[in-house]
Amino acid sequence: MYRRSGRGRVLLLVFIALSLVIITLDFRQNPGGPLKRARDLAATVVAPVQRGFSAVTRPVGDFFSSLGDLTDLRSKNERLEEDLAEAESDAAALPQIEEDLAVLQEYFELDKSWRQMDRVTAPVIGRAPSNYKWAVEIDRGRSSGIRPDMSVIAPQGLVGKVIRAGSNTATVLLLIDPDGAASATVEGEGNNGTIRGNGGSELLSLEFIRTDADVNVGDTVVTSGQDGGIFPRGINIGSVAEVGGEEADVSKDITVEPFVDFDGLTYVTVLLETGDRIAEDRAESR
Amino acid sequence: MSATARDVKTPSVLADIGVARGAAIAALIVLAVALQSTLLARLTLLGVRPQLVLVVVVILAFLDGERVGLVTGFFGGLLIDLLLPGSIIGLTALVYTCIGYGVGLFRQFAPTESVLSPVFGVAMASALAEFGYAAMAIMLGQPWVSIGFTAKVAGLVVLYNTLMTPFAFPLVRRVADRFRPERVHTWS
């Protein structure tokens, strides 16, 4: 028993030392280092199992979440039919509007709208296996044109950005993660700020909006396009839930409720003309 | 022929685990990580996810002792770290290594026949792992990790992990026993 405990202690010290070496390497490594390759390898090993589990468990999860919606399905259906009729009439005028927009963009040298950008839609196959990180794994990667720093959206609004792109999978950092941030503004208000995740809370914080800015509860917050090409201008983020801060403060404390349900994400869309590509295009045009 | 305790050759870590069993445990860890990041990530308790990999590590440490516990803890934690974007690689590995060793070492004090022993072990280990991770994260420059948030996460993870243990324990024991290598003690 004594010898076994002694050997266990030696092994413990060896593995603690190994962990500390890895932590140090992680702090000191440059992008593309050995640990980056290890991340890609780990994602490659786990992704097929995640894909299988997602395919099996998604219908179960969807079934339970849709049970609560059964009562208002009829009214929702009627509303959708009305929306469809309206959308069909709008669609007839769309080609002309797009043509006019393209001419105006070229004339005034405006950035391309995110609505016109090439995009790829991908299923969510996994989530970060931790309570201290908010990210999702998607089933498309470099082979579909996805690269780090590209914007990711859902029909309701901004989801986050790509932070790792493997050959067939990619990792998206969600906006609710404390490391997730985007340049944002309150629609109709000229002030630019930064929208930031709070981790444990589903609510976001809008920082650096001046105290004299006219911001009210219910106002819509959108991206301002001041991120050097990562998030294009005008993507919906959420609505203002609370406005705080003293008059003596430099900026307001604004809490924003996101439009996107980050827990319920099943598909997301990656805007392929954002991130490095758009930043490079801008640099070339200067 | 006479033999003393000193003459008994104690098995190495590799012999403790065995190649086939090592592969089976590795597959079990990958499966646990995949489950933790898919189905269990959707079945949250107040937004908190259970930590199935930790449960597997604690059960293995409880069944096979500190050396198997720390090795599976290290590799299970490392796999989680590698799948967490922007996190500090090695942090979960370090915490789970210590947890695996600690559970394996203190199992000798637990009543072996009691079904509550692994459940209690998982509960204690879950609380220690969450607070240990949070403390290390704050020390390594993640200031947003607060005591209040960690306490909420730790409480719910303890509850969730404890509820999963009675279901996970027989499955993990079955895999651990199925590939258990013959222990050969030689006498010189």
Image: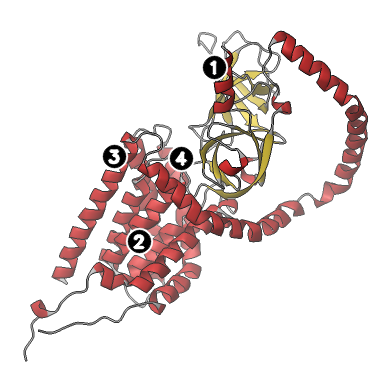
Identify the subunit bearing mark 3: A
**Mark 1–mark 2 distance (CA, rounded to whole Å):** 49 Å
Residue A125 on image: x %, y %:
60, 51
Amino acid type for the residue under numbered disc 2: Thr
Q: Residue at x 59, y 38 (%)?
A: A146
Sort mark 4 into few (<14), some (14-19) or many (20+) by Cα contacts within 10 Å: some
Q: Do the residues under discs 1 and 3 have CB atoms within 8 angstroms?
A: no
**Mark 2–mark 4 distance (CA, rounded to whole Å):** 28 Å
Q: Residue at x 18, y 69 (%)?
A: A4
The lab-note entry on whether marks 1 and 3 share a chain reads: yes
Amino acid type for the residue under numbered disc 4: Phe
Q: Above or below — where is A37 with respect to A102?
A: below
Residue identified by numbered label 2: B72
Q: In which quadrant of the rendered view does residue A267 lie?
A: top right
The lab-note entry on whether marks 2 and 4 share a chain reads: yes
Sort mark 2 into few (<14), some (14-19) or many (20+) by Cα contacts within 10 Å: many
Closer to the eye: label 2 or 4 = 2
Residue B164 on image: x %, y %:
50, 63
Q: Earlier in the sequence, mark 1 or mark 3?
A: 3
Sort mark 1 into few (<14), some (14-19) or many (20+) by Cα contacts within 10 Å: few
Residue identified by numbered label 4: B149
Residue identified by numbered label 3: A24
Q: Do the residues under discs 2 and 4 have CB atoms within 8 angstroms?
A: no
Front position in the image: A40 or B112: A40
The tally of labels here is 4
**Mark 3–mark 4 distance (CA, rounded to whole Å):** 27 Å
- Secondary structure under tag 1 reads helix
Residue identified by numbered label 1: A283
